[in-house]
């Protein structure tokens, strides 16, 4: 399951990946989000992989990185924080990020909300970000 919400006032997109996530689902979600005009003023992104199990292999990463690069190439660069805590998901997300990040936005990795808030310079408390992560309004179904 992929849940998300865009907070227009802070120009922040939060995405939470929950359970088993296939490459095709991430590809469809990235295509949808990055090509939607509702997110034209997007500045920051939090991608929470802490509750996910990514069901793809390193050989699939080039495809995911390429779709993100093609869509993002014309966008204003922004920052992404990847929230991760499992070794496999951390490695896969790190590789995706590094593959597409040559000329695009800065990406950061952390396992705590406090560090995430600091990296994005958000004016929010840990408990408020945690509430937002657990109450995201939209679910993406491909």
Image (spheres, rainbow, N blue to C red):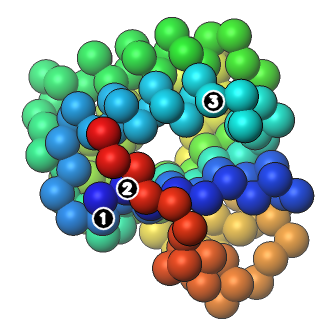
Residue at image position (60%, 84%) is 131
- Which residue position is annotated with label 3? 36
Q: Determine which of the numbered discs, if any, sits on residue 31 in the image.
A: none
Are the two marked residues, 1 and 2, in contact with CB atoms closer than 8 angstroms? Answer: yes
Query: Tag 2's secondary structure?
Result: strand
Of pointers 3 and 2, the one earlier in the residue sequence: 2
129 and 101: which one is in front?
Answer: 129
Front: mark 3 or 2: 3
Query: Tag 3's secondary structure?
Result: loop
Query: Tag 1's secondary structure?
Result: strand
- Which residue position is annotated with label 1? 18
Q: CA distance from mark 3 to mark 1?
A: 22 Å
Q: Determine which of the numbered discs, if any, sits on residue 2 in the image.
A: 2
The quarter of the picture where residue 72 lies is: top right
Estimate the x, y position of residue 142 in percent, counting from the top left.
30, 39
Are the two marked residues, 3 and 2, in contact with CB atoms closer than 8 angstroms? Answer: no
Visible in this render: residue 142? yes
Residue at image position (56%, 68%) is 137
Of pointers 3 and 1, the one earlier in the residue sequence: 1
């Amino acid at each position: 399951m992929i849940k998300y919400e865009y907070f227009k006032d802070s120009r922040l997109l939060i995405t939470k990946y929950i359970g088993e996530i296939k490459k095709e689902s991430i590809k469809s979600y990235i295509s949808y989000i990055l090509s939607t005009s509702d997110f034209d003023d997007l500045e920051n992104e939090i991608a929470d992989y802490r509750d996910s199990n990514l069901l793809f292999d390193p050989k699939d990463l080039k495809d995911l990185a390429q779709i993100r690069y093609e869509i993002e190439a014309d966008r204003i660069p922004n920052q992404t924080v990847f929230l991760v805590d499992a070794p496999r998901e951390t490695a896969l997300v790190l590789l995706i990020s590094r593959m597409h990040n040559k000329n695009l936005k800065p990406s950061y990795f952390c396992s705590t909300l406090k560090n995430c808030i600091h990296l994005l310079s958000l004016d929010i408390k840990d408990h408020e970000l945690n509430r937002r992560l657990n109450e995201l309004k939209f679910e993406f179904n491909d």
